[in-house]
Image (cartoon, rainbow, N blue to C red):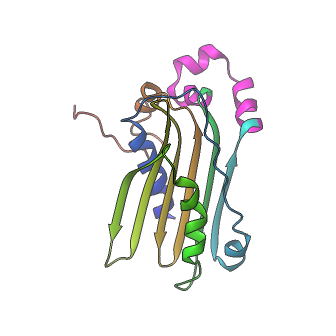
Amino acid sequence: MKLAITAAALAATAALALPASAQPREFRMPDFNHLRARATETVDVNVGGFLLGLARAFTSKEDRAADPHLAILDDIKDVKVRSYKFDNDDAYTKADVEAVRSQLKGPEWNALVNVHKRDAQEDVDVFVCVEDNKTCGFTVIATQPREFTVVSIVGSIDIDKLAELEGEFGIPKVGAAE
């Protein structure tokens, strides 16, 4: 699941260069039940409105303002991760990848990062949704012959808050060296 962690960290790092948004962009995670049935290892993360609202309810605005780990709760509307590891190649199809990519077309979605390793057959693509010059979502697609991962973050991203998370939760430090 190293690829899944790398993909999530890449999405968070890429967000550091972008402005924040007020309106979330809807992204619908495809139903990957057929992949779940074939996978030897799965990760399903669903943190949405109710759970994020509950987290906000148990923290004061003052606490969230003082702690960048909690402050990010104000901006994120939905986080979904689907990651599948298989014991053989070709367990997922191009149609599975296209079910995600087809939603990332249009003027509001931009390919932000594309990393492709031909020999290792590894691809990581980070897309950002921008409306009215403000970010409203990120989607990461990471593939290897035996692994398929999708990370979706919907909501506005306050860059100052996100920058304070550098070095935490697997987010690499990308700022100036001390």
Asked where in the image residue 57 lies, by quadrant, the reply is top right
In the image, is residue 170 above or below residue 90? Answer: above
In the picture, which quadrant includes the C terminus? Answer: top left
Q: Residue at x 53, y 17 (%)?
A: 66
Left or right side of 142 for 24: right
> Overall secondary structure of the magenta stretch?
helix
Q: Residue furthest front?
A: 107
The image position of residue 64, as x and y in percent, is 59, 21
The image position of residue 174, as x and y in percent, is 30, 40
Q: Residue furthest top?
A: 62
Left or right side of 98 for 161: left
What segment carries the magenta color?
Answer: 50-73
In the image, is residue 81 above or below residue 145? Answer: above
Q: Residue at x 54, y 75 (%)?
A: 94
The question of residue 59 being in magenta is answered with yes
The question of residue 28 being in magenta is answered with no
Viewer-nearest residue: 26 or 118: 26
Left or right side of 175 for 167: right
In the image, is residue 10 above or below residue 173? Answer: below
Q: Residue at x 55, y 32 (%)?
A: 156
The image position of residue 47, as x and y in percent, is 69, 44
In the image, is residue 68 above or below residue 128? Answer: above
Left or right side of 3 for 53: right
The image position of residue 158, as x and y in percent, is 49, 27
Asked where in the image residue 87 lies, by quadrant, the reply is bottom right
Exactly how many numbered labels are in the figure?
A: 0
Q: Residue at x 67, y 17 (%)?
A: 60
Viewer-nearest residue: 40 or 28: 28
